[in-house]
Image (cartoon, rainbow, N blue to C red):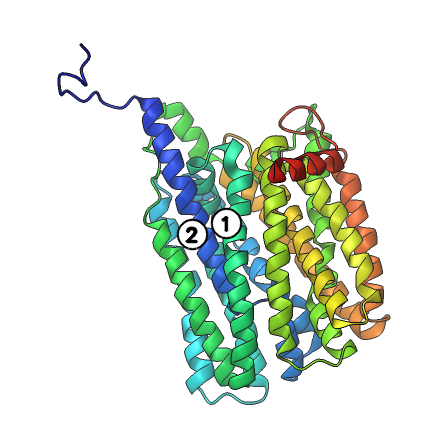
Amino acid sequence: MNLRELGVESSPTPTQTQAARDRRNYWVYLFEGGFFVFGMGFVNVQSLLPALILEEGGPSWVAAYMPTIMMIGMFGIPMLNAGWIDRLKQLKPFVKLTGFFQRIVYLVIGLVLIWGGLKGSAVWMALAAAPLFSGILGGLGFAAWQRLFMNSVPSAKRASNLAFRFLFGGVTGIVAGALINWTLGHYPGTIGYGLLHLWATVFFFASWGMLFLVKEKPVEPKPDAVEETVTSEGVWTVLKRYYAPGPLRRSRRSFVGSLFFMHAFTLVVPFYAVTLLTRLDQPKSFLGILAMWQMGGQSAGNLLAAAVGDRWGGRATFGFGLFAVCVTIGAAPFLNDPLHAQLAYAAFAMSMMVMFIGKDTLLMELSPEKGQSSYLAGMAMVTMLSLVVFGGVAQLIWSSFGGFDTLAFVAIILCVAGFGFLSFVEDPRGAHVNPLRAIRRGILRVFR
């Protein structure tokens, strides 16, 4: 007779407790990200805001930075407090605090757009201010969020979690695209813009509420010597040690190159939708239709990335995504009817999602055991610099050197350079997997 038959429940083992925590956190993070992506669908920084800013008389350089302005703010800040975050024993309280301020910006801007009586340049300035200030405030806790995610979701499940987060947001985002179309058709101007910001706020705070459900791992006591080492190290010390001469130095440096050049895709993003709008002679509400196709493409990309990422890792997924981005950008200059434009826009969105998820997965797989926040802050700084550089290049080419077609050509060349750097990155999971072979196996796995 065992203990259960006697009415005595045995306590769960540490392994069972950890497994239960991992399952809980997996689903919590899936919905946390899904709600956030859903909210972003109402204030789409790729297909909606750049076109609206140009339509409202904003300068082309502002439109050029719109798809990346939140990331510029978010990725530029972590270098300032990464060392302090590395010393935090509990990450969840700080993530919740900074997450609140990151989201409240959209409520404020939405109310100002509806009741502030904005006119002229003030309109496009308000549209640009929301993602910028949200990114800056979110950047204060970005490294902490990344560490909390890495500590809460097992490495073998991170790719699918990232993918399904975006998949959930992408599927629901189709609804957001339809609502954009309806809202701008019935409430043109600042009232419509403000309503979109308020609807986004609802789902941003649903995302924030999920953070309260994360089960953070208990703090494990460390020897005093280890505590002192972690406390005394700064960002540059961690990065200097990480890139010190050794067998992995070339691989780690190559990843930095691929991380920088992959963001060349942002050359075409701010001007893609507005180019289609002008070329096809469509009304402004067509932006909502493009947003729906974008979300559909992202959903497909998430399914592919989830199938490949957990099984073959971030490197294969990242590589295929970069390759697909090059192909889909190449089709953009030849679009001349609405149906082909919508399909191509969806394919481009699908490719970007595969690339993003692969990059984020590989980034975490390459993270060191000590000084994670400092390493992540360094990679965030590389991303921020690339976004600033390519935003400036995009505006220059758009206004002075041939417009959208030239942007597409330059983006392809630079993304190919990123693929070349990636080929020198050692796969953290061991064997190098051919990205095209991995994606073929992944597709078969999805439909079996």
Residue type pointed to by label 1:
Arg
Q: Amino acid at mark 2?
A: Glu
- For label 1, count other residues whose C-alpha is less than 10 Å away and answer few (under 14), some (14-19) or many (20+): many
Residue at 32 percent across and 47 percent down: it is 213
Tell me where residue 167 appears, x and y as whole percent.
Answer: 54, 51
In-front residue for pair 87/195: 195
From where the camera sits, is residue 241 visible? Answer: no
- Residue for point 75% across, 81% down: 281
Residue 18 place in picture, x, y as percent: 36, 29
Using the image, determine if residue 76 lies above or below residue 354: below
Percent across and percent down for residue 417 are 80, 46
In the displayed structure, does residue 187 sit left or right of residue 276? left
Secondary structure at numbered mark 2: helix
Q: In the rendered view of the protein, which quadrant contains the C terminus?
A: top right
* Residue 201 visible in the shown view: yes
Residue 271, percent across and down?
Answer: 72, 70
Say if 248 sits above or below 395 in the image: above
Residue placed at 39% from the left, 36% from the top? Answer: 23
Within-10-Å neighbours for mark 2: few <14, some 14–19, many 20+: many
In the displayed image of the protein, which residue is found farthest to the front?
448
- For label 1, the residue is 165
Q: Label 2 belongs to which residue?
A: 32
Whichever of labels 2 and 1 marks the residue nearer the N terminus, that label is 2
Q: Residue at x 78, y 58 (%)?
A: 329
Q: Quadrant of residue 253?
A: top right
Q: Is residue 217 left or right of residue 165?
A: left
* Residue 399 in the image: above or below residue 247: below
In this view, the residue farthest toward the top is 1
Element under disc 1: helix
Q: CA distance from mark 2 to mark 1?
A: 8 Å
Are dots 2 and 1 in contact, CB under 8 Å? Answer: yes
